[in-house]
């Protein structure tokens, strides 16, 4: 705004988005998704923008490769992103490698991680860590890295040990880490995708559920890896699809307090295949039907009223890590599972109990990097994208903040001209129609 003094600190925008649906129905969903994403970028005008995607390419990556290329090209060449003159894109396209694929090793069911980093042209003091050389390097131009990422020294990619999912040997979810030096402050950005609830019936059996225990183990593994002795410790932001779910047993007991339960079993195996909860009176109206992949509650408004905050008491999975991970207060509705019907922006599917799966978390030291203001101007925003627009089955979630000048741990072994680490940037301007050259692609 003209005449207004520049806000202190460096504007940062961190976005997490499970985008699998976009590649299953690209014609109807991608345009809306990109429009809503660009609106958030325009509203916050970050100097540094990180977009962490999960299920990038959808359920069948190989069949979706043309849609993947189109999506990446759009992000890198859009008029809305013109002022981001430098970019790094890391796509885990190794869908043919059973040993190394980040998320899954079965043909046609191997959703990938995709990490996008955009640097505004006014940002002069940014560098990226080389994990092999163990020093920071200047970031110039736009580059895309795909196929196998193991040979790329600018990131760390790991899968979880195979025995983490003993009942599902093919599921090889994992994480990708990059490290950055911004305003002489070092921090890690971790893209993560944890295991989902395979069955609503199994999740309902115990509190906490067996799936919650698997996610707890996997997240603990990630946190241990990023603070081990191989590299100097740094603040970290972990954002992705954690697949955190509400405590199913407690939620059902609360939603169906006055209901009676009917159990339906398979005739041949006697296995429980369905639970039906009916009101004790009121003509025994059905309140909830629960199957392996069905969570059909009669009143979805409970998940939308006041952004579903009454249900936050059942969001317990992060509490185990309260000394290692911090999160701003949630004031947006559950981010999953939304209808994939492009005409339905607020409707949940009846496949799972709505939950805050998509999160932006940070280490205690990263919390100190966030500049807070005592004035009325809001400098920190934690919210979702596209509240009334179909964005696929997940709503993207973002954290926008300004990094406090001089905060955090100073970067070590910086490659470049001495004295370049001082804060040098100006406020981003609205995008113009200028064009940039094609990005370099590394396979």
Image (tube, grey):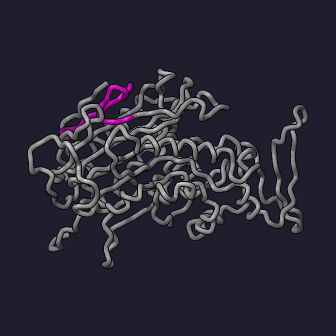
Looking at this view, name the residue that lies furthest to the left.
418
Query: Between 204 and 232, which is closer to the camera in this rendering?
Result: 232
Q: Nearer the viewer, residue 171 or 294?
A: 171
Q: Main secondary structure of the magenta part?
A: loop
Q: Does the magenta segment cover residue 199?
A: no
Residue 436 is at least partly visible in this image: no
* Magenta residues (range): 139-156
Query: In this view of the protein, which residue sits in the foreground, 13 or 149?
Result: 149
- Along the viewing direction, whichever of 62 and 144 lies nearer the viewer: 144
Q: How far from the left and from the top, in percent, is residue 47?
A: 24, 55
Where residue 405 appears, as percent x and y from the top left, is: 22, 62
When the figure is inspected, residue 241 is found, relative to residue 135, above or below; the finding is: below
Q: In the rendered image of this protein, does residue 109 appear above or below residue 139?
A: above
Q: Residue at x 59, y 27 (%)?
A: 170
Report if residue 257 is visible in the image.
yes
Which residue sits at x=51%, y=22%? 98
Could you say where residue 440 lies in the image, as x and y percent from the top left? 23, 31
Is residue 153 part of the magenta span, yes or no?
Answer: yes
Please give left or right for residue 119 compared with residue 250 in the image.
left
Quarter holding residue 314: bottom right
The structure residue drawn at horizontal position 52% and vertical position 45%, both measured from the top left corner, is 219
Q: Is residue 169 left or right of residue 407?
A: right
| 285 relative to 7 in the view: left or right | right
Indicate the position of residue 178 as horizontal and vertical percent values. Answer: 34, 41
Query: In the figure, 95 relative to 372: above or below?
Result: above
Quadrant containing the N terminus is bottom left
């Amino acid at each position: 705004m003209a005449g207004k003094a520049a806000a202190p600190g460096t504007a940062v925008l961190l976005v997490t988005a499970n985008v699998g649906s976009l590649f299953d129905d690209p014609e109807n969903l991608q345009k809306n998704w990109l429009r809503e994403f660009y609106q958030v970028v325009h509203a916050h005008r970050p100097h540094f923008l990180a977009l962490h995607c999960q299920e990038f390419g959808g359920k069948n990556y190989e069949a979706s490769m043309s849609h993947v290329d189109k999506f990446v090209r759009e992000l890198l060449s859009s008029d809305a992103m013109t002022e981001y003159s430098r970019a790094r894109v890391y796509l885990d396209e190794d869908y043919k490698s059973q040993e190394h694929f980040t998320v899954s090793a079965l043909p046609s069911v191997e959703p990938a991680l995709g990490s996008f980093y955009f640097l505004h042209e006014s940002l002069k003091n940014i560098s990226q860590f080389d994990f092999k050389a163990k020093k920071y390097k200047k970031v110039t131009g736009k580059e895309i890295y795909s196929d196998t990422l193991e040979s790329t020294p600018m990131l760390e990619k790991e899968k979880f040990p195979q025995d983490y999912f003993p009942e599902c040997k093919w599921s090889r979810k994992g994480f990708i880490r990059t490290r950055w030096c911004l305003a002489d402050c070092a921090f890690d950005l971790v893209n993560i995708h944890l295991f989902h609830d395979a069955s609503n019936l199994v999740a309902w059996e115990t509190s906490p559920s067996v799936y919650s225990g698997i996610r707890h183990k996997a997240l603990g593994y990630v946190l241990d890896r990023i603070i081990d002795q191989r590299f100097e410790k740094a603040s970290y932001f972990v954002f992705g699809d954690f697949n955190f779910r509400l405590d199913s047993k407690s939620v059902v007991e609360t939603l169906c307090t006055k209901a009676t339960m009917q159990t339906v079993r398979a005739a041949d195996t006697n296995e429980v295949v369905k639970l039906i909860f009916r009101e004790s009176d009121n003509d025994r109206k059905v309140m909830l039907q629960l199957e392996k992949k069905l969570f059909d509650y009669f009143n979805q408004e409970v998940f939308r009223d006041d952004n579903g905050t009454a249900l936050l008491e059942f969001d317990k999975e992060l509490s185990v890590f309260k000394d290692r991970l911090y999160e701003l207060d949630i004031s947006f509705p559950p981010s999953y599972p939304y209808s994939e019907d492009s005409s339905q922006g607020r409707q949940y599917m009846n496949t799972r109990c709505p939950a805050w799966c998509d999160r932006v978390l940070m280490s205690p030291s990263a919390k100190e990097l966030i500049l807070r203001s005592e004035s009325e101007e809001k400098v920190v925003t934690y919210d979702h994208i596209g509240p009334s627009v179909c964005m696929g089955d997940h709503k993207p979630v973002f954290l926008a903040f300004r990094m406090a000048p001089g905060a955090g741990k100073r970067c070590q072994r910086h490659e470049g001209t001495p004295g370049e680490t001082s804060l040098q940037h100006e406020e981003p301007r609205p995008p113009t129609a200028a064009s940039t050259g094609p990005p370099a692609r590394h396979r």
